[in-house]
Amino acid sequence: MKKQERQRYIKRLLSSNEIERQEDFVRLLRAEEIDVTQATISRDIKDMQLVKVPSATGGYHYSMPVQKQMDTEKKLKRTLKDAYVSYATQDKFVLIKVLPGNGPALASLIETMHYDNVFGTLGDDSTVLIICKSLDATLELQQMIQRLLSDN
């Protein structure tokens, strides 16, 4: 399994579980038939910049860094507003045209957001192709793009 896909699973686990130890990540991922080691989880935690926050039960649990997610969304919004030319959808594909030189940055920002409905992105100089997981996901992404473009 690719690191990016594994980290999406980790993000999903964080949204539905209070995970206190790295071993808990290993156990939960193995329950999903994803074979990982504690060392791999340790690297993912560092790469994803996960933080430990106080738990309602008195201990601490892992969490996504709120500021990083907000910063990335701000960058995504700014890049879209500054470079956006047009977009089109077809089936599970969303094609965004941007000013030359902005495609790779926009594709990277979309990947960094770890959207659950996005299967993957490709970015060249002035185009980003986003492959969604379903037709409904395509509609959700289209609405998100419109929201980012219209927000002040």
Image: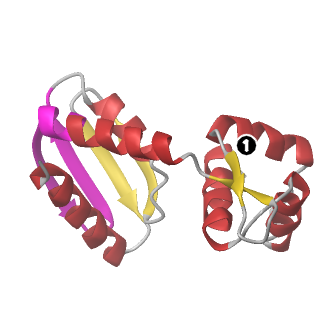
Whether residue 80 is in magenta: the answer is yes
Estimate the x, y position of residue 138 in percent, counting from the top left.
Answer: 30, 68
Residue at numbered disc 1: 45
Estimate the x, y position of residue 109 in percent, counting from the top left.
Answer: 39, 39
Per the rendered image, the range of residues in magenta is 79-99
Estimate the x, y position of residue 34 in percent, counting from the top left.
Answer: 80, 62
Query: What is the residue that sits farthest to the bottom in this orientation?
Result: 136
Whether residue 107 is in magenta: the answer is no
Q: Number of marks in the image?
A: 1
Q: Is 130 placed left or right of 52 in the picture?
A: left
In this view, 101 is above or below 140: above
* Observer able to see residue 132: yes
Q: Is 86 placed left or right of 142 in the picture?
A: left
Name the kind of residue labelled 1 in the image: Ile
Residue shown at the point (66%, 63%) measured from the top left: 14
In this view, 142 is above or below 81: below
Estimate the x, y position of residue 112 in percent, counting from the top left.
Answer: 47, 43
Q: Main secondary structure of the magenta part?
A: strand
Residue shown at the point (66%, 61%) measured from the top left: 9
